Image (cartoon, rainbow, N blue to C red):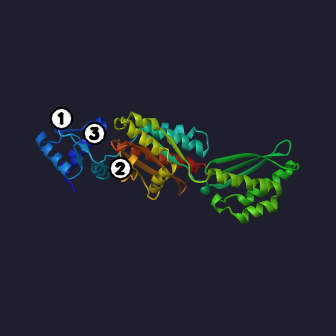
C-alpha cells in the first residue's frame, strides 16, 4: 500500500494529467497543489511511484504520466466522487422524458445524452428479443381483406404489420380474435414461445393465427440477438491520444465489431454498480489505449441491458462514472414506469 504522501502526489499528478494531457513535473505539482513539501521531495516520491509501476516517464527529460496501474489505484482508492448539479439532473430527466415513449427512442436519447455529458463514445445494449414480453396485441380491420396487426412488447417495443386474409372478417369477429389472442399470449416472453404455442395459435385462429405466427417468427429472425446503440464516436477525434491516425482507425474498426462490443459489455453485466476496465485490462489491442466504464440498467428488478462509455485512459473518471450511473438510473426509471 502507498503511504499518505505518495497517495497525495499520485492523485495530484493524475488530476493534472487528466486536465492538461501533458506530462507532469515536480515543480508543477508543488506550484498547483499545496502538499507542504518541496519540489525535491515530490521528485523523490515521483521516482518511487515510477519504480513501483504507478507512473511512467515517456521521455527522459519529461515529467511523468500515470500508468494503467496508477489509474487503477486512483479509481479504486483516490477518486473523489463527482456530483452533477441539480439543474443538469433535471435537464437530463426532462430530455429523456420528452423522447418518444418507446424503448428504442429512450435508448437513442440516453446514448446521445451520455455522449454529450462525457464527450466520449457512449454505447447502450438494448434488451434482446427473447427477453421481450407480450403486453398487448391489436387487430384492426382494413379494406380489401387487410388487417393491421400491432404487437406491443415490454419494455416499450411496438411492431406493426399489414396482413392479408383470404376472406372478410367482420369487426366483431376481429375484436373477438384480438381478445382471445391477448388472453393466450399476454405475459409470455419470446423465449417461451415454441412449437406447442405456435401449433395452438394456428389451430385455433386459422389463417390469422398462421399469419401471426409467421410475423412473430420473422421478427425473431430479424431481431435475433442484442442490439447496440452508439453515439459520440466523433468525440474520439477531439482527444490528443487519437491524433495518431492509425490508432484512431484501429479504434473505429473495433467500434464497428458488434460481437466484440457485446462481449466487452456483456462481461460488465455480470457485476452490479459502475465498473471500470482500464487500458490493458481490455483484451482487445485497439482498446488498450482506452478505458471502458459500464453499468447495467433495469426494468423493475430485472437487468435488461448495459450502458457503457469508451474514452482514453486519461478520462475524467469521476465525471464519467457519475454520468454512467446517472443515465443508468434515469433509463431504468423511465422503462420501469412504462411497464
Which of pointers 1 and 2 indicates the residue nearer the eye? 2
In the rendered image, is residue 256 in sight?
A: yes
Alpha-carbon neighbours of circle 2 within 10 Å: few (<14), some, or many (≥20)?
Answer: many
Residue 142: percent from left, percent from top: 82, 43
Give 62 or 196, whichever is nearer the viewer: 62
Left or right of 121, for residue 56: left
**Can you identify the residue that label 1 sits on?**
31
Q: Which residue is mark 2?
A: 278
Image height of 79 relative to 28, above or below: below
Query: Which SS class for mark 3?
Result: helix
Q: Which class describes the residues within 10 Å of circle 3: few (<14), some (14-19), or many (20+)?
A: some
Q: Secondary structure at mark 1?
A: helix
Q: CA distance from mark 3 to mark 1?
A: 15 Å
C-alpha separation, residue under disc 1 versus residue under disc 2: 29 Å
Is residue 38 visible from the viewing direction of this image?
no
**Distance (Cα) linking label 2 and label 3:** 16 Å
Q: Where is mark 3, residue-wise?
A: 17
Q: Residue furthest front?
A: 246
Q: Is residue 289 left or right of residue 300?
A: left
Q: Earlier in the sequence, mark 1 or mark 2?
A: 1
Q: Quadrant of residue 18?
A: top left
Q: Residue at x 47, y 52 (%)?
A: 265
Mark 2 touches mark 3? (CB < 8 Å): no
User: In which quadrant is the N terminus drawn?
Assistant: bottom left
Secondary structure of the residue carrying numbered label 2: strand
Q: Measured from the top left, where is residue 279 in percent x and y? A: 35, 49
Amino acid at each position: 500500500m502507498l503511504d499518505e504522501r505518495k497517495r497525495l502526489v499520485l492523485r495530484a499528478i493524475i488530476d493534472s494529467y487528466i486536465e492538461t494531457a501533458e506530462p507532469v513535473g515536480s515543480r508543477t505539482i508543488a506550484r498547483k497543489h499545496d502538499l507542504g513539501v518541496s519540489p525535491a521531495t515530490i521528485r523523490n516520491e515521483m521516482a518511487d511511484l515510477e519504480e513501483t509501476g504507478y507512473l511512467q516517464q515517456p521521455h527522459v527529460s519529461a515529467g511523468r504520466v500515470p500508468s494503467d496501474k496508477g489509474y487503477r489505484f486512483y479509481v479504486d482508492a483516490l477518486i473523489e466522487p463527482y456530483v452533477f448539479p441539480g439543474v443538469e439532473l433535471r435537464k437530463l430527466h426532462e430530455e429523456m422524458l420528452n423522447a418518444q415513449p418507446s424503448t428504442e427512442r429512450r435508448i437513442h436519447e440516453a446514448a446521445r445524452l451520455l455522449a454529450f455529458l462525457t464527450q466520449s463514445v457512449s454505447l447502450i445494449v438494448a434488451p434482446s428479443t427473447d427477453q421481450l414480453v407480450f403486453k398487448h396485441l391489436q387487430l384492426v380491420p382494413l379494406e380489401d381483406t387487410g388487417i393491421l396487426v400491432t404487437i406491443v412488447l415490454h419494455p416499450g417495443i411496438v411492431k406493426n404489420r399489414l396482413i392479408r386474409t383470404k376472406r372478410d372478417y367482420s369487426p366483431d369477429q376481429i375484436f373477438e380474435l384480438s381478445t382471445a389472442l391477448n388472453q393466450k399470449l399476454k405475459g409470455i416472453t419470446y423465449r417461451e414461445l415454441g412449437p406447442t404455442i405456435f401449433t395452438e395459435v394456428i389451430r385455433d385462429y386459422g389463417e390469422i393465427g398462421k399469419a401471426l405466427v409467421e410475423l412473430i417468427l420473422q421478427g425473431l429472425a430479424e431481431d435475433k440477438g442484442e442490439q447496440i446503440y452508439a453515439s459520440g464516436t466523433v468525440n474520439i477525434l477531439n482527444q490528443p491520444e487519437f491524433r495518431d491516425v492509425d490508432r484512431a482507425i484501429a479504434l473505429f474498426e473495433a467500434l464497428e465489431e458488434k460481437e466484440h462490443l457485446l462481449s466487452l459489455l456483456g462481461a460488465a453485466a455480470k457485476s452490479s454498480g459502475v465498473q471500470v476496465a482500464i487500458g490493458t485490462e481490455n483484451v482487445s489491442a485497439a482498446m488498450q489505449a482506452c478505458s471502458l466504464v459500464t453499468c447495467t440498467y433495469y426494468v423493475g428488478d430485472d437487468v435488461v441491458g448495459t450502458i457503457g462509455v469508451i474514452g482514453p485512459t486519461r478520462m475524467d473518471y469521476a465525471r464519467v462514472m457519475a454520468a454512467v450511473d446517472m443515465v443508468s438510473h434515469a433509463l431504468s426509471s423511465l422503462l420501469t414506469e412504462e411497464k
